[in-house]
Image (cartoon, rainbow, N blue to C red):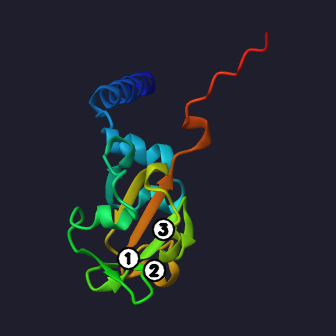
Amino acid sequence: MKKIFLIAALITITIGAMAQKYTSRAKSPKELLNDKYTSGLFTNAEGTIFDIENETVGAYFNILDWLEGRVAGLQVFVSGSGVRVPVIRGSVATIFVDEMRMDALFLNALPVNDIAMIKVIKGPFAGAVGNGGGGTIAIYTIRADEEEEESPSQIP
């Protein structure tokens, strides 16, 4: 009797594993991009992902100018000193570049053509100071290993 239960349990486990293998869905391109660039708390945080490498952003001086109007609830204000400040739902958003906290002024020096992905997290984010109650904008730059390698010049 124990052998029958053991065999039935093994068959059930095998069928369950096979069913899971065939029913798991393929990841979307944005999910793959999220897996490629993010780590730790940034991976699991729900947010809007933008694939900047496949967008036309070259005409913008600051990436916040491009983002404004593409994310519901995001407004960009310009301070008296010319710094663009992102505000999500009435609170100043925390900015991260390659998962390191940066000031909004830093984005003026960051070329938009060097940006690969942006993840906008509208709700509180545990990785930000004070849980990022104003939301978070995580910007990821193109990695050095992704840039096209130039062929070495040949010496005659």
- Give the Cα separation between the discs numbered 2 and 3: 22 Å
Q: Earlier in the sequence, mark 3 or mark 1?
A: 3
Q: Residue at x 21, y 66 (%)?
A: 69
Image-based side of 96 in relation to 4, left or right: right
The quarter of the rendered structure image containing the N terminus is top left
Mark 3 residue element: helix
- Whether tag 1 and tag 2 are in contact, CB under 8 A, the answer is yes
Q: Position of residue 66 (x, y in %)?
A: 30, 61
Q: Position of residue 33 (x, y in %)?
A: 41, 43
**Front residue (pair 146, 18):** 146
Read off the residue under disc 1. Answer: 124
Q: Residue at x 40, y 65 (%)?
A: 62
Of discs 3 and 1, which sits in the foreground?
Answer: 3
Report the amino acid beneath label 1.
Pro
Report the amino acid beneath label 2.
Asn
- Give the Cα separation between the discs numbered 3 and 1: 22 Å
Read off the residue under disc 3. Answer: 107
Q: Position of residue 141 (x, y in %)?
A: 51, 52
Q: Quadrant of residue 80?
A: bottom left
Read off the residue under disc 2. Answer: 131
Q: Tell me if residue 112 comes above or below residue 85 in the rendering.
A: above
- Give the Cα separation between the discs numbered 1 and 2: 5 Å
Mark 2 residue element: helix
Image-based side of 4 in relation to 72, left or right: right
Q: Residue furthest front?
A: 156
Q: Earlier in the sequence, mark 2 or mark 3?
A: 3
